[in-house]
Structures are given as structure tokens and as C-alpha cells.
Image (tube, rainbow, N blue to C red):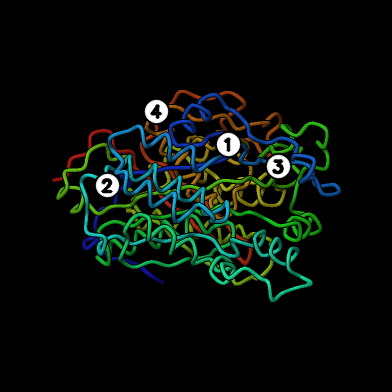
Amino acid sequence: MYRLKKENSKRVFVSGMGCVNSIAESAAEFEQALREGRQGIDFYKESKQKGPIKIGAEIRNFSLNKRIDDYSLKENVPQTILNKARKVARRSPFVIQTAVAAVLEAYVQADLFHKQVSGERIGIIVAGNNLTNVVKNAYMDKCKNDLEYMSPSYALQFMDTDHIGTLSEIFGIFGEGCTIGGASASGNVGIIKAYEMLQLEIADICIVVGAMAELSDAEMYGFYNVGALGGRRFGTEPQKACRPFDMEHEGFIYGQGCGCFILESQESIAKRNAAGILAEIMGGAILLDGNRLSNPSVQGEARVMELVLDRCGLVPEDIDYINTHGTSSPLGDETELKAIKQVWKDQVKNVWINSTKGLIGHCFYAAGVMEAIASIIQMKEGFLHPNKNLDHPISKGFRFVGNDREEKQIDIAMSNSFGFGGINTSIVLKYCSQYKSE
């Protein structure tokens, strides 16, 4: 397995972040929404309701052009970049437009437009796969009887790499780039691979995009029929449907969202005298169960948490807070708690636990990045967001955040993401209150 020697390990930091989801169109809005415990889960618009599937956490009223117009009023974004974003992404699929908005916000926060780094030293990883199924279905519905009239643009748009091409063209990225998949763990996989890219000095900065999963009817019904999708019991009360770790949980609620992290080496931060560093990525780990099915493994999840702690030189007691995978799936929730208990043993009562999915649903490929953003916001602002609908916990002895937020200072956080096919991931984040480059 991949392992860097601790004595040779380089420090990697988060210098910018951005997001779009069902409760916020920016990381700044996300902070307020988390603080309030705002929830984005509701009925789909009637045109999107399919049979028994009526509930989700949609992005509503988002406009990339409006976001670009807002930035055009500010002095810290070059007009050439905004013009290029308008031109290149104007006909892009919705999922790519959300990515452009998230990266634009992260670039502004990291001050990369003015304290520039050579584009050849910037890499990009887009986390997610099968990103344009809705686009594919729309093209097929339109042209199924006359395929010779298929739009030439489809030759580019059906590939996940259209994200890479669009973002690299807009932001002038000429370093290493790729798309990477890990099912629901894709976001964490992307963060970990970007961390490794900087450790190996392949790049000085890496943009990580947790891409929005725009699920088609086929995917939604696949999840529904396998028993993973919730919303049955609370079909008339959508905001009660997603309830991680509660006795009445019954399955995940699909959420739309896209998140962006900018990871940067310590040397790059010092060289460009970057300010406002958000957090340190202490380390990450990916391990497999050797299982192609959807059922999770206590041993697999425990092993990956133990491995990341070892890589970071930490013990369980050093972790103040876990942002869990916590999907509201009965088997998934129970498995994760057993794994946490196996690692923390009698100290489990001292580590805070919540799930961001209770507010924004399950964002699939973006979940790892979105939940890492939520973790950093909570560390930075000194609170833990509510664990929505946790009325009757499935297990005692854990330190759950309840239906109300907790005012707590968190210094070191763990964020878990697990995916179908036995993919287990965990990352550790450290809050940087007074960053010093030396």
C-alpha cells in the first residue's frame, strides 16, 4: 500500500474552497446554513417526480451567469477570466457550470488570480464518474430516430474529461490532471490523490473538484430497487426523511452539490506569501474490502480509520470530531458506528459525531469534498452543526450532536467516506488558527 515515510512527509494545506448545494450557493452561505441547521431536502418539482421517488435535495435557481456578474463587480477577479468562463461554459452541462462556480470561488479565496503560480505547477483532479448520464439521455431522447443529427458537441460532453478540459481552459491549468472515481467515496479519493500529488512534488497546487452527480431516472430507480434510497416512510414530510443514526432511518436521500478544494504545498504558500490558510490536510487513507457489492464492512471501515491515524502519527484520542459518512441507511449507519467503536473503544464517548448528509442529502461524488468543507467551516467558526432528525439514536454511548448545534472548538477532525464496491476512505484535517509558513 502507498505510504510516505513520516520524516519525509511534506505539509499540505487548504488555501481555498467553494461550493454549490441545496442550501447554499457559496462556502460563505454554507457557513450560515450549517450554523442554522438549514435543510435542503424537499419535494422534487412535479416534472421530476417519478413514481414513488418524490424527495431530494435539489440545487434550485442557480445561474452561472449571475455568479459571474456578481464577480464582475469585484476587483479581485480579472475580467479576462470572467469573459472566458462565460464563453467556454455557456453551453456546458449544468454539472460543469456548478464546477466552474465552485472553482471560481475557491480561486478568489486563495487569492490565486493576483498571487499567481505558473499554470504548469497547478494540477487538477475531478472526483466522480459517469457524470453526464442526464445529458446522454437528453441527447438520445432528442435524436433516437435520427442519430445522424446528433450534436457534434456530444462527442466531448459525454466524457467525464469535459470537466477537466473546461476548467483547465478557463483557469489556465497546464499541470497534471485527471478524473478519478470511487463511487460515494470519490471526493475523499480526489483529496487523497491531490495530497499525494503535492507530496511527490508533481505540482505545487492541486484543484480538487467533487463533481455534482446528476442522476438519471435509471440510477434513481436502481438505488430505489436495491433498497438504498429512502423517502418511503416520510413521503409526505420530506424534511424528516433523512435521519442519520436515528432509529427511523430507512435509506439515503439524493442531494445535488459540487465542492472545490485548493490544496497547496507549504513551500508554495510561503513563496507567494498566501494569507488566510484554512486547514492542514494531515493525511488520508484508502482501503478495499475485496467486495463488489453494496454491503459495508466493519473491519474495512475500522482499518482505514486506524491507517490514517497511524499515517498522521495520531491516536484516536487526538480526534475531536468525526464527520461521518452517515447516509441514513440502517446497515450503513450501524456499520460505521461499530467501526468507530472498534477504533475508539471506551474513548468513543469523547469524540463528537454528526453527519452533514442530514442537511444536504447524499451528494455522491461531491460528498467527501462537501463534508470536508463543512468540517473546516465548523472548526473555523467554533460550532458543530445539528445532526438533523436525530430523535432516537440507534446506539448509546456515542457523543452525537443532536437537533441543535453545539458551540465547540474543534482542532483536529476526521471525515469518512465509503463507497459501493468496498471502497473505504478517511482523511484527517487540522485547523490552522495562526498559520506560519516557516
SS assignment at label 2: loop
Residue 381 badge? 4
Q: Nearer the viewer, mark 4 or mark 3?
A: 3
Tell me which label, 4 or 2, sits earlier in the chain: 2
Marks 3/2: CA distance? Answer: 35 Å
- Residue 230: x and y in percent read 76, 45
Q: Nearer the viewer, mark 1 or mark 3?
A: 3
Q: Which residue is mark 2?
A: 112
Q: Image point 37% across, 32% down: which residue?
A: 380
Marks 2/1: CA distance? Answer: 41 Å
In this image, 394 relative to 156: left or right? right
Tell me which amino acid carries mark 3.
Gly
SS assignment at label 1: loop
Q: Which residue is mark 1?
A: 398
In this image, 128 relative to 117: left or right? right
Q: Image point 69% across, 45% down: which residue?
A: 253
In this image, 211 relative to 308: left or right? right
